[in-house]
Amino acid sequence: MIDKEFMNFKKSLLIILYVLALFPSQIFALENKILFKINNETVTTIDISNEIKYLTFLNKEFKKFKQNEIFEIAKDSLIKEKIKEIELKKFFKKIELDKKFVKKFAIDYFSKFNINSYKDLEKLLTANKLKIEDIEEKITIQLMWNEIITKKYSQNIKIDKKSIREEISKKRIQDEFLISEIVFNVNNKNELNKKFKNIKDEIEQNSFSKAAIVHSISSSSINGGEIGWIKESSLSNKIKNEIKNIQVGEITKPIKIPGGFIILKIENMRKIQLELDDNEEAEKIVRRKTNEQLNQFSNIYFNKIKKNVRIDEL
């Protein structure tokens, strides 16, 4: 664990790190310091600075945060990535994938930035002082992590395909919700109440988006918790019942899910006519539910292996 001395030490670096993130890479060589060690993996001021730039690139709201919040979020993001990398090395000789596959995934992943080619992506990253090699490494780690989770937990996926098809055939016109999420875990009920209060305070004082970035352990956190439009037939009965009790702009109470709790906010809603045939629509929903459950198992597995990881100040 990171001790009190390190907590004090890091505070003195906050302003330096924030400023470093805004300057060219040539300056980093003069200022680079090892901050802490995760097993045998080190994290330096350059690592933190690059992570700050990356997170700011993904969500411009990030740079509006307080310096200590920026540091903590970047630090936690790096620790999570390093822990995954450490675990991957137990299963693979090299952390690498086919370049063409990684490039295609990168183009799809960053499509919201209106890029159409890998060259467009390179130009975009360069303009934001980011290296394409670093982004490829992040993508590779996440894809290989997903592969492990799929192999470990695919047999644990439980989806009632029959009921999905029945609901689709009965309701060709459905409600569709634009939803944001905050996923978190706690050790006991007392912690749950305290955590929920902290999250609500953050939402009321700032926004749901900031609360998601600060508190959520989901991959959607960097996007402010946004998970997009979801048809009611894609929601579990438990989620559906909670959603029906709130209006647009409101949030649910914490809902128990495998590996933790989830808070949902309805950003908007609308009525839609299902356009695909029953089988195609059902398969689409099954894929979404499968990914949702795999994400939950991912959190469970990560929390399990994190307990055996040592984090030390250097």
Image: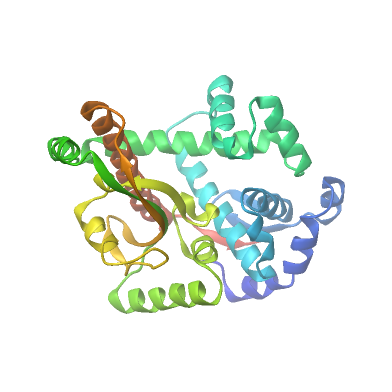
Q: Is residue 13 visible?
A: no
Q: Residue at x 75, y 44 (%)?
A: 128
Report the quarter where the C terminus lies. Answer: bottom right
Residue 57 vertical placement versus 245 (above, below): above
Q: Position of residue 20 (x, y in %)?
A: 79, 57
The quarter of the picture where residue 22 lies is: bottom right
**280 shown above or below 310:** above
Measuring 65% from the left and 32% from the top, which residue is drawn there?
A: 115
Q: Count all numbered tags in the image, as a single digit.
A: 0
* Nearer-the-camera pick, 248 or 31: 248
Work out whether residue 277 or residue 59 is closer to the camera in this orientation and state it.
277
| The quadrant where residue 268 appears | bottom left
The answer to which quarter of the image holds residue 184 is: bottom left
Image x and y of residue 192, in percent: 34, 74
Q: Residue at x 26, y 36 (%)?
A: 286
Q: In the drawing, does residue 268 fall left or right of residue 71?
A: left
The structure residue drawn at horizontal position 12% and vertical position 35%, both measured from the top left corner, is 162
- Give the image location of residue 256, x and y in percent: 27, 62
Out of 37 and 71, give the one closest to the viewer: 71
Question: Looking at the image, is 56 positioned above or below residue 5?
Answer: above
Q: Decide if residue 180 is on the left or right side of residue 207.
A: left
Q: Answer yes or no: is residue 244 visible.
A: yes
Which residue occupies the foreground of this view, 87 or 260? 260
